[in-house]
Amino acid sequence: MLSKQYKRVIQLELNEVSNPIIQHLIDEGKMPNFKKLEHSFSYLQTRSEEEYEKIEPWIQWVTAHTGKSHAEHQIFNLGDAHKLKHKQIWEVLSQSNIESGIIGSMNAMRNDTKGGIFFPDPWSIHGDVFPASLKPLWTLISNRVQSHATSKIGVSDIFKGLQSSLKFNVPMSIYFKIANQIVSQKLNPKVKWKLAILFDLFQAELFKNILKRSQFGYYTLFLNAIAHYQHHYWRNYSRSGFNPEIKYDDIRESDDPISYGYEIYDKIVGDIINQVGQDEDTLIIIASGLSQIPYTDKEEQGGMNYYRLKNHKEFAESLGLRENGQFQVFPLMSRDWQIKYDSESSKQTLLTTIGGLKINQEKLFNTREDVDGFVFIETAYTKSVGNDDAIIDQNGKVLNKFNDVFTNIAIKSGHHTGIGNLWLSDNQLSNYEAGKLIELTDLFDLTKQALGV
């Protein structure tokens, strides 16, 4: 498909960005760099899974990185990358002595990749960071993201993260922007939504400096704030189809996180393209993996509410599931978490205890075991909750008031679709038709072809 081979591939993974929004903002003059792509890049669409439960980023990015469909790679949950039996693209390239700089790619493992840099997503259970000097920075970001701003970060953590930032030439301006944001949201919690895009900006600055100082053959940068904003705040971008009586209480009425985030992504893309300059030996790939459309199905019921535990470990311990070797607790994205157990008896205790919890006579959690040793847990209850509604155990005992241990993190407004977007700086593709659908699995072979592997 490509017109030539390249010495370097840069893959910008803009998770779940939606082309209709991009086109709308281009028309409003708000995305000048994406407008330039219309003339200088090829545009394709990617197709992945059709079953909705499989159209998840932690599945689709594994597909993109391995060239295998879900039926082949069988990765279903975030945090399951250690189960993967197929080699990811950076592992394949490493076998040909091509090093990679991986920043934030979702549900990924470094495994036996040689050299390079590996900075996994902040939900990674194994925290497979390389080199070790980047680990304090990853730990700082991971703790903040996984906690959804509920846990405290100590001065020592901040100092170690600052040292790591200095070592990799991350501008102090972005570090101080995050610190200022944390202070601002303590004074006004309704600006807390901006923190997600600041973490993306931080990773982008780290990526740009690694790009500048290294000579790797393959790079990825994964950004996720837009996906978060679309799921949570679509009704503030467009009211069409949404119940006007449903409003968010965690942002200001005039805020539009989606437009704000897309404009920042436009600048990040422009900065990286400008940094590459006229280098004809570099192929730039911009991929969304999947995308979103508005979700309005349950507006008449007050919307679909997503709840997240305020403190997963404290909640597990309140049920008697103490972290003493038998159990380890791992928060994941949104309403999901995992518990690792050490024996069959521990597993049965866990399933009985968690599976038996109810609220308003409905099941509180869904549980499943896709990986030996881990139980994946999802908050199943999505209806509105009153201040006095309580969590009941399998024996009918009242444990906690729901609102004491859970927080409402979203009223769902964006819905996944398996059609993704793909821009390539090679604008002379053979057999190319604008907007043509290709399989997401093809991205793996396209990268190998680009680098002559």
Image (cartoon, rainbow, N blue to C red):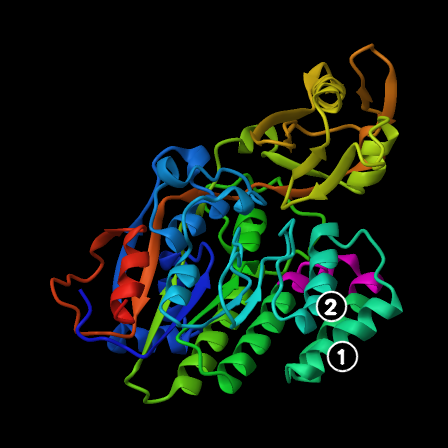
Which residue corresponds to the image point at 70% horizontal and 21% vertical from the top-left? 344
Per the rendering, the mark at residue 66 is: none
Label 2 amino acid? Pro
* Quadrant assignment, res 294: top left
**Relative to residue 210, is residue 102 depicted above or below?**
above
User: What's under tag 1, amino acid-wise?
Assistant: Gln
Q: Which residue is mark 1?
A: 163
Report whether 10 appears left or right of 151.
Answer: left
Q: Main secondary structure of the magenta part?
A: helix
Region in magenta = 185-196
- Write down the quadrant of residue 448 in the picture: bottom left
Q: With 318 as the anchor, is 268 left or right in this view?
A: left
The residue lying at 52 percent from left, 86 percent from top is 213
The quarter of the image holding the N terminus is bottom left
- Using a 10 Å C-alpha cutoff, classify the residue at mark 2 as few (fewer than 14 neighbours), some (14 to 19) or many (20 or more): many
Q: Position of residue 437 (x, y in %)?
A: 23, 52
Residue 407 can be seen in this image: no
The residue carrying pointer 1 sits among few (fewer than 14), some (14 to 19) or many (20 or more) residues within 10 Å by Cα, namely some
Q: Are marks 2 and 1 in contact (CB under 8 Å)?
A: yes
What label does residue 136 carry, if any? 2
Give the Cα distance between marks 2 and 1: 8 Å
